[in-house]
Image (tube, helix red, strand yellow):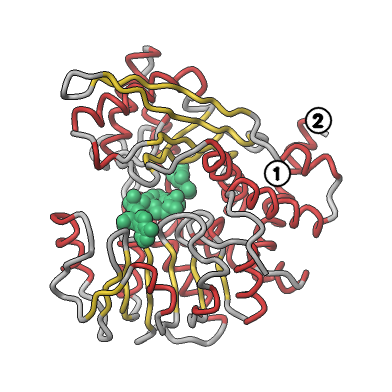
Amino acid sequence: MSEKTLNPFEIAQQQVKGACDKLGVEDAVYEILKNPMRVMEVAIPVKMDDGSLKSFVGYRSQHNDAVGPFKGGVRFHQDVNRDEVKALSTWMTFKCGVVGVPYGGGKGGITVDPRDLSQGELQRLSRGYARAIAPIIGEKVDIPAPDVGTNGQVMSWFIDEYQKTTGEFAPGVFTGKPVDFYGSLARNEATGFGVAIMARDAAKKIGLSLNGATVAIQGFGNVGSFAAIYMVGMGAKVTAISDHTACIFDENGLDIDALIEYVKGNKQVQGFPGAQKELHRDELFGMDVDILMPCALENQITLKNVNDIKAKIVSEGANGPTTPEADKIMYDKGIIVVPDILANAGGVTVSYFEWVQNLMRYSWSFEEVQEKQEKLMVKSFDDIWTLMHEHNVDMRTAGYMMSIKRIATAMKYRGWY
Ligand SMILES: NC(=O)C1=CN([C@@H]2O[C@H](COP(=O)(O)OP(=O)(O)OC[C@H]3O[C@@H](n4cnc5c(N)ncnc54)[C@H](O)[C@@H]3O)[C@@H](O)[C@H]2O)C=CC1
Ligand SMILES: O=C(O)CCC(=O)C(=O)O
């Protein structure tokens, strides 16, 4: 068997089609959902520090807003392209549907390696992007957030530039802001926390104790680092972590706090003095662990490595880390895959709480936010688990089915079909 496609947008369409067919909805539902409603492509000229001018390409894809405003992150990465952004916006629509937050899906990005830019260049690029997309976003229209390569500082520049461009101070137009600048407590932790609690609930279902359970995590950015912290908090041992440079291993469990400090200074896991072994980054998937957490990029679990996987549970922190062919093999082998649209939905869930707090000009405590997140995600997990057994499908298909029902209902009331 060979991989049909590695194009993330085609994969997203395939996933939506599969669930629409399984649900038996009218053909019109897939016809509407198969393409984003709007994709904006922008050129962003930036004055570089050496005096030259460089033009960058950016996108904002608005997939569907039947349920509520478009919502989703902005990625700064060298591989960003139109189809990737379209796929990511499609996944956002169904993710919001899975946890039942009142949003549709959107996603943006710029083709750039932010590590190649100075802080000044990064700020000018971020401001240029905010100016370019300002006409199509808004607190009640489309609400961007962080994704790979962006963070609270970038969101703050976005807010400032949006205000200069539109004359409106609207802190709720971007989420994932710093806590002391209209951000929400527990947003930074939210995605990794969610990935961990979804793995915990899957473990409960198969009678796997987390006490001493072993975990391998691909990616040690926002999502991977917090997933590691929370897994250790639940009694598990994170024995392997990889990033773009290497895979590090310690059979007794890596010291996550020390690794976070190391990565702050060195921007990579390679060379971490606390590791027993250092391997090629791709060796992570074959590690002999109970739980695997892909928390980096798309198309990481493929036909090339799926048969190396020994884990019993895969909790997808990244968007689109598994190809459909690899997904099927894991399903046939009985590996539980908690799909991205559920496992990493903690980010958008707490973004929603941030937005609500912004609109009310009020703040909740860390505990209050995390408790609300956990309640919502655990309920979604249980509902999907039930649906999965009712229809004899994998968790991903069940998640899409649950979400499509919600979105199709909104589209029907709106008279879209
Ligand atoms: N930040 C958030 O709130 C959310 C993020 N996600 C998804 O989670 C994933 C990670 O996002 P963040 O942690 O925010 O990004 P980040 O930029 O903070 O970290 C990305 C990590 O992936 C690593 N990486 C890149 N290429 C790699 C490779 N080939 N092999 C191994 N590691 C590699 C990087 O070294 C880095 O450690 C993405 O798919 C993103 O779309 C999903 C939901 C919300
Ligand atoms: O926080 C958000 O609004 C969206 C985060 C995101 O981009 C994602 O869930 O993939």
Amino acid type assigned to the residue bearing label 1 in the image: Ile
How packed mark 1 is, by other alpha carbons closer than 10 Å (few <14, some 14-19, many 20 or more), is many
Mark 2 vs ligand 2: CB below 8 Å: no
In the rendered view, would you say 267 is above or below 249?
Answer: above
Q: Which residue is mark 1?
A: 407
**Which one is nearer the viewer's eye here, 321 or 372?**
321
Q: Residue furthest front?
A: 2
Q: Which residue is mark 2?
A: 415
Residue 291: give x, y in percent of width and height. Answer: 44, 77
First along the sequence among labels 2 and 1 = 1
In this image, 410 relative to 247: left or right? Answer: right
Q: What residue appears at the point 38 percent right and 74 percent down from the top-left corner? A: 283
Does residue 337 appear in the picture of this structure? yes
Q: What residue appears at the point 53 percent right and 36 percent down from the top-left corner? A: 82
Residue 234: quadrant of the picture: bottom left
**Which one is nearer the viewer's eye here, 109 or 45?**
45
Residue 252: give x, y in percent of width and height. Answer: 25, 86
In the rendered view, would you say 261 is above or below 200?
Answer: above
